[in-house]
Amino acid sequence: MGATVVGWSPLDELVCESVPVTADNHTALCVLGTGLIGGSLLRAAAAAGYTGWGYNRSAPGVAAAQKAGFDVSDDLAAVLGRAAETDALIVVAVPMPAVNPMLDAIAQYAPQCPLTDVVSVKSPVAAAVRRYGLQERYVGGHPMAGTAESGWQATDPGLFRGAAWAVGVDPGTDPHAWTRVARLALDCASVVVPVTASEHDRAVARISHLPHVLAEALAVAGARGGDLALGLAAGSFRDGTRVAATAPDLVRAICEPNSDALLAVLDETLAALTEAREALSAHTSLDELTTAGHAARQRYESARRWEITDIEPGAPGWLEKLQDAGRTGGVITRLDTGSERN
Amino acid sequence: MGATVVGWSPLDELVCESVPVTADNHTALCVLGTGLIGGSLLRAAAAAGYTGWGYNRSAPGVAAAQKAGFDVSDDLAAVLGRAAETDALIVVAVPMPAVNPMLDAIAQYAPQCPLTDVVSVKSPVAAAVRRYGLQERYVGGHPMAGTAESGWQATDPGLFRGAAWAVGVDPGTDPHAWTRVARLALDCASVVVPVTASEHDRAVARISHLPHVLAEALAVAGARGGDLALGLAAGSFRDGTRVAATAPDLVRAICEPNSDALLAVLDETLAALTEAREALSAHTSLDELTTAGHAARQRYESARRWEITDIEPGAPGWLEKLQDAGRTGGVITRLDTGSERN
């Protein structure tokens, strides 16, 4: 496993070196849930040469996808039957509260298929997967992309371009299923961040779930200032509250399943804010907070991804190596064809 | 005073109806401090036909402005002497910690000139102005515009386009000086938000200073997740921490002079976050916070400015009428020539 620095910052779009796959038996893709993420995935994969189809619960959602030329239906048994016949990679792309019924159906109709998901938390999904006995060919996934909108009308085949796509490397991960999932992420022009479920959940509590909570609180504080305050609001308020425009149910579905990790970082942040409050009250000083915050933002802006190379899924120690690499900013931008053995 | 709805949302750029003034004795403008805000103001006013000049403390700042063709010097006495000779409008455009020496010099060299400022808080500036005996022709100002950058090289004559520019309407405001200040804001293509000093300071604590504090705390929480968390960070973290890129000294200069109002809204926010933390811990629910936050952001997005018309500065009750109008989202987008009597 070598290390080559790639990209310039977390804001840059890395050019993915993976050549889209050609049509072969590895490209069958079954997406359960064709909202913003699942629908965008179906479109991105189709553009990369996959044979994709999907399930959606709502009739308007099905109609919208069909109208756009995609094979989406509300017949879950038929959709999964086709996956079983073609050894398709199944992607669970519904919010956490809707995951169980999907896994129930997969266990019934397509239990042997490689399985991943794009849900915003990983440990709760992994636990549910184990309850349904599907852990053998499961690899968690989470593309770090999205918008405040939802539904098929918001889908975008370029949504994942340059995004970080977390792919699970927990002990016991099947290398064949892992390769299928990593390949899908690369074919959607994302970079793969190898990470265990629990480390993922603690990380996203910091950089995704806490931002949502703070944005909601900031929006509330601003609106309590009435028309005058909202009329004076400029960039800092607009950007700081942007994700509060997300539907409340969706924010809850993202944050609540990760409550343990979120509570930990929320307590840490309450402590930091309380300390800043005391310093402001006692010494009229925000020195400590502003110095630390500025240094932290600088670290974020100057963070560099580096390329993990020479991956051989299944080789001795491969999971531990990937775990270590992911912890220090390593990403995968390509897979050699030789590494695909499924 | 009539009410006409103008604009579509706080995000829209209102087209300012004020025709740039022609060269006459109202267009003399003296800007003290030619950093991001003062320098941009000098450039915007020049483009609108003003005769502007300025003072800057630092030699490189002076050189940069001169190289761009602007009459900027480090001789404060001479700069203010010219203001006194021409009845120029003097604009104090330095951070709060540097305000006193400017007022001291103004009291010495140009005490009769109309006076405004573009400092981020208003009550502390007004108090300082009273200490130097300059309150008679002082009108507070605050254009709600800026970037994370600073210095002449960051100046932009279009910085104030469509911005809300708070203009003071405290009891005792001189109508002639007020008209000069409002006219300057309109000539820079901003809209005028009439507001008292204390109401301004409470409002900006909510929509400008609290966003800075939360952005700093969020950046710190993210960076504590290390390279893995920063590598997974996407839009919500990027936008939520954007203003933490501002130099710590500048954030302190903005927030610390408004510590009373900031402490009040920070306590309010700590209480809301603590309540959300308890609900998440006890019931795994963020229902209340997300519902309130989403409604607040919707209110912000749908807020409409309305146009205050038929202003006659100096007419009986004009200040109270403007105070009331500003509180409910009213803005001034033009001044009739007849209203200028100075």
Image (cartoon, coloured by chain):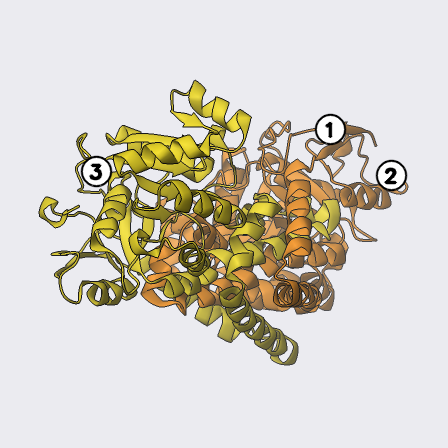
Chain colours: A orange, B yellow
Label 3: few (<14), some (14–19) or many (≥20) C-alpha neighbours in 10 Å? some
Q: Which residue is mark 3?
A: B26
Q: Which residue is mark 1?
A: A5
As shown in the figure, which amino acid type bears the numbered disc 1? Val
Q: Are marks 1 and 3 in contact (CB under 8 Å)?
A: no
Q: How far apart are the two marked residues, 2 and 1, measured between alpha carbons?
A: 24 Å
Identify the secondary structure beneath mark 3: loop
Quadrant in which the C terminus of chain A appears: top right
Q: Are marks 2 and 3 in contact (CB under 8 Å)?
A: no
Specify the quadrant of the image occupied by residue B326.
Answer: bottom left
Left or right position of A109 against B77 = right
Q: Nearest the camera: B215 or B58?
A: B58
As shown in the figure, which amino acid type bears the numbered disc 2? Ala
Give the foreground label among 2 and 1.
Answer: 1
Disc 2 chain ID: A
Left or right position of A328 against A147 = right
Q: Note whether B224 is above or below B319 in the view shown.
A: above
Q: Which residue is mark 2?
A: A315
Identify the secondary structure beneath mark 2: loop
Q: Are marks 2 and 3 on the same chain?
A: no
Q: How far apart are the two marked residues, 1 and 3, measured between alpha carbons?
A: 59 Å
Disc 3 chain ID: B
